[in-house]
Image (cartoon, helix red, strand yellow):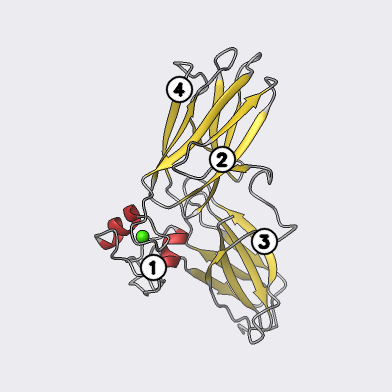
Amino acid sequence: MKRTLIILYALMAGCLHAGEPGSSPSSAGLIPTGTNGVTGTLVRDTDTHWYRFLAAPTLVYTVRVDNVTLWDHDLALRIFADGENVALASSAIHPLESSAMVWTNTGGLRYYYLNVSAFLQFTTGTYSVAVSANDTDTDGDGIPDAWETLYFGGPTNAVVTATNASGMSTWDSFVTGTDPHDPDSALRVRVDANQQTTELRWNAVPHAAYHVESTTNLVSGDGWVFRGRFVTGAQADEPLYIDLTGTHRLQYYRIVYEVD
Ligand SMILES: [Ca+2]
């Protein structure tokens, strides 16, 4: 007899809960897109600098290094998500003064981490690094024109609270990197519960992190217990969560999409 009740929420997590596993160094400095970026100095060739930037789904980002005064000329510029190298700009910058990488976010809205480090021994000196994207937001609803135009035909057409064919709101589709018009793209869970185990699988996008949470009291709206964090790679593997403890009691689950 199936006695486990399952529900799904597609939520945006504003931040990681304290004590949970983070995706990258907490000391990473923020680089807002469209600015002049930040300047750093590699004092020793073993220095490794971390930055982060918020990337929206489907947008193309350019990460540029300028004003390099490094002695020696080899600098590594990499984008990471959960420890996985998503993109590599250059292991040897030529010409020395400037280098850029162009990268498309195929996942959802989340922070990606940028690593600047020396590639060869003796690389020291200063650099500046900036992140830019076509992220103009004409109507100021938090969704860039490019995404609105891609899915709704114009830069001001999307209604963030509207429920679309996917069954999700426009905003949730944007955040989770899914297609608002495609039910098969939406963040949705499949459940196989029996006497022994409860198995949850859900649709995922590349380079995303999801939390599984559960509670036995849906009425109170609190008491959600963190059960696990699951990350996907470049191919958007299908996460699987198996609960061995939920049998024979009423249990609610939710999947939380992690932004930061
Ligand atoms: Ca907008």
Q: Amino acid at mark 1?
A: Thr
Mark 3 surroundings within 10 Å by alpha-carbon count, few (fewer than 14), some (14 through 19), many (20 or more): few
Which circle's residue, 2 or 3, is located before the other in the chain? 2
Q: Secondary structure at mark 1?
A: helix
| Nearer mark to the viewer, of 4 and 1 | 4
Residue 207 placement (x, y as % from top left): 52, 49
- Residue at x-position 46% and y-position 31%: 64
Answer with mark 4 or mark 3, whichever residue precedes in sequence.
4
Label 4 secondary element: strand
| Disc 4/disc 1 C-alpha distance (Å) | 38 Å
Q: Quadrant of residue 215?
A: bottom right
Residue 252's place in the image compared with 27, above or below, is: below
- The image position of residue 75, as x and y in percent, is 56, 22
Q: Which residue is rendered at x = 49% and y = 19% of the image?
A: 93
Nearer the N terminus, badge 4 or badge 1? 4
Q: Residue furthest bottom?
A: 219
Find residue 80 and name its label.
2
How far apart, in angstroms, are the residues tagged by discs 1 and 3?
27 Å
Q: Amino acid at mark 2?
A: Phe
Q: Disc 2 vs disc 3: Cβ atoms closer than 8 Å?
A: no
Picture quadrant where residue 81 is located: top right
> Which element type, helix, strand or loop, lies under badge 3?
strand
Which residue is identified by label 3?
228
Provide the residue designation for mark 1: 170
